[in-house]
Image (cartoon, helix red, strand yellow):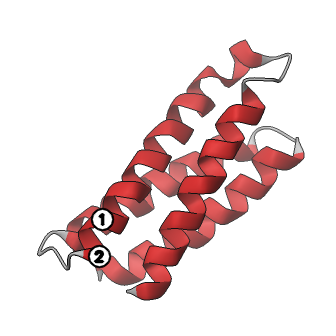
Amino acid sequence: MDSCIEECLRCLRACEECIKACLQEPDIQARVKCIQTLNDCAEICGQATQYMSRNSEFSSQLCGLCATICDQCAMECESFQDKHCQECAQICRKCAEECRKMAS
């Protein structure tokens, strides 16, 4: 569980940093869906961390949803070539992998 919590926190931070960077890009209109997904991803990662930290009976279900959202966020970020999006996508993929382990 500890490694999943760590990955969720890492993903939350990466998503928040990516949102900030995306808002500075000249093609911000093309990034609206990506920014929305980054926000969803950051929030679900925070929630998953809280649920796991208190050993909630719903942790595994929430981690399953978190994995789905992290995968979607990675896909959105991968569609942009800048460094911050590519790095965020990698972190989201790793988080999704850890969350899938927790969900099963």
Image height check: is 88 above or below 100?
A: above
- What residue do we see at 76% from left, 45% from top? 85
Q: Residues within 10 Å of mark 1 (few under 14, many from 20)?
A: some
Residue type at the position of mark 1 = Gln
In the picture of the structure, the residue carrying the numbered disc 1 is 50
Q: Position of residue 77 (x, y in %)?
A: 70, 43
Viewer-closest of 45 and 63: 45
Q: Position of residue 63 (x, y in %)?
A: 33, 67
- Which mark is on residue 53? 2
- The answer to whether residue 71 is left or right of residue 32 is left
Q: Position of residue 94 (x, y in %)?
A: 60, 72
- The answer to whether residue 53 is left or right of residue 14 is left
Image height check: is 49 above or below 44?
A: below
**Farthest-out residue, top:** 29
Viewer-closest of 71 and 45: 45
**Helix, strand or loop status at disc 1:** helix
Residue type at the position of mark 2 = Ser
